[in-house]
Amino acid sequence: MMQEDITNRILDAQEHPEHYTDEQLEEILAEADNLALLKRAMEMEDTNCENIDVEAEWAAFEAKHPEEKTIGKPISNHIRMKVAASTIGIIFIAGAAFAAAVGLGIISNPFSTKIEPKQEMIALVKTDTIAEKNDTIVSMPVKQEAKTQIFDNVKLEKIIAEISRYYHVEATFANEEAKHIRLYFEWDQAKSLDENIDILNSFQKITITRDNNKLTID
Amino acid sequence: MERKQISMLFRQHYRHMYSLARTILYDEQESKDVVSDIFERLLYSDIVLREDTAEHYLLTSVRNSCLKRLQQKSNRERIEKLYAQERNVMEEPEKDEERLKALANFAHTHLTLQQQTVFRLRFIDGKSYDEIGTEMGISRVAVWKHLSRLTQTIKEQFKTSEL
């Protein structure tokens, strides 16, 4: 197609997109790259000349998120992770000391051939991000009523399956690729479904929308 | 993140973030929403930003958030509003801005004033050919010719230079 024809097609499609199929519009969009960039450049110029009242925008933001909302928020994930890590560390050291004492004959082994753990505890195992089979789901009891379940390098498909079962909602993936996104995610069961959805939505590639008992993942 | 730090980052970087969002989404309110959402996420998260990397993080967040919104738009909307494709929004915000400045400069030096005016009225203000013709005192055909000519000029420039 001659250059002029391409230009004419772009301008015509821009004025009358209804005359073209979706596939044709896709092609035309690729041809209109340069114009689109010029529009971006001019928009940037215009914006730089505008008087943006940043203080007014901050006031609006503060009004939307008053100080009281953020006071008394639950223990942050960061602190919880530190507590969990410290707990594991202390238990391992205690266990190692015990084993050493038994080994040195200082203490006789109170257990028979089988060791029966009195407390449910599974160590947190870091997985290789490349290995397909190494999904690890561990439970770390933080408080008695609700657990924090840690998903380490687990596919979003699996995470959503667990969460939707727990909160009794249905989940549908609108985007097939999203199923295979792997995450490190600490699922705090004490938090509401909406709170956990917000946390998952902070990942750039994930969009979850809720309509009553249905979740849609993009 | 502490409210005090949010307030500092907001005041330091809002203008820049909003400007970037506008160059991708064009709409004032949508652009403000994107920036506001990013600060909202920071307010309720444990993310800690270092001073030297905060700007880059914030601008990259704007870019990603805007492109995510563009993914929801139909092809018809994309051609009507002339939204940029993802490949035309460089990953490095600083390089992206440099390129846009170079292009704006090129437009000012290589396009006639009439061509620039027609471009703004059509692609930024969204006016019809008839409205543009009336405003500029030229025929509809003349409007088309200006647009056609400037499109070719820009295309040739892209072929021959680093734009």
Image (cartoon, rainbow, N blue to C red):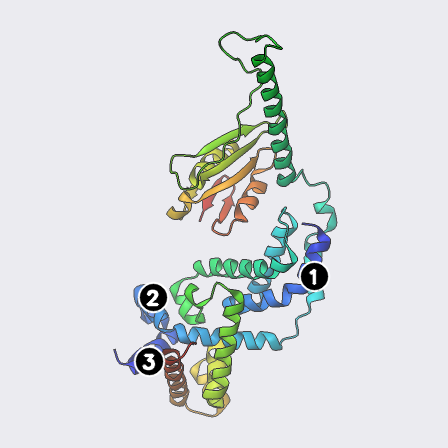
Work out which quarter of the rendered image holds the N terminus of chain A and state it. Answer: bottom left
Few, some or many residues within 10 Å of mark 2 (<14, 14–19, 20+):
some
Q: How many residues crowd mark 1 within 10 Å: few (<14), some (14–19), many (20+)?
A: some
Q: Which residue is mark 3?
A: A8
Residue B48 higher or lower than B152, as above or below: above
For marks 1 and 2 on the same chain, the one whose residue lies earlier in the sequence = 2
Of the numbered discs 3 and 2, the one sitting upstream in the chain is 3
User: Residue A142 appears at what percent x and percent y?
Assistant: 62, 29
Q: Which residue is mark 2?
A: A26
Residue placed farthest to the bottom in the image?
B137
Q: Amino acid at mark 1?
A: Trp
Q: Secondary structure at mark 2?
A: helix
Q: Label 2: chain?
A: A
Chain of the residue under the numbered disc 1 shown in the image: A
* Residue designated by label 1: A58
Three-letter amino acid code at disc 3?
Answer: Asn
Say if residue B69 shows up in the picture. Answer: yes
Gap in angstroms between the C-alphas marked 1 and 2? 39 Å
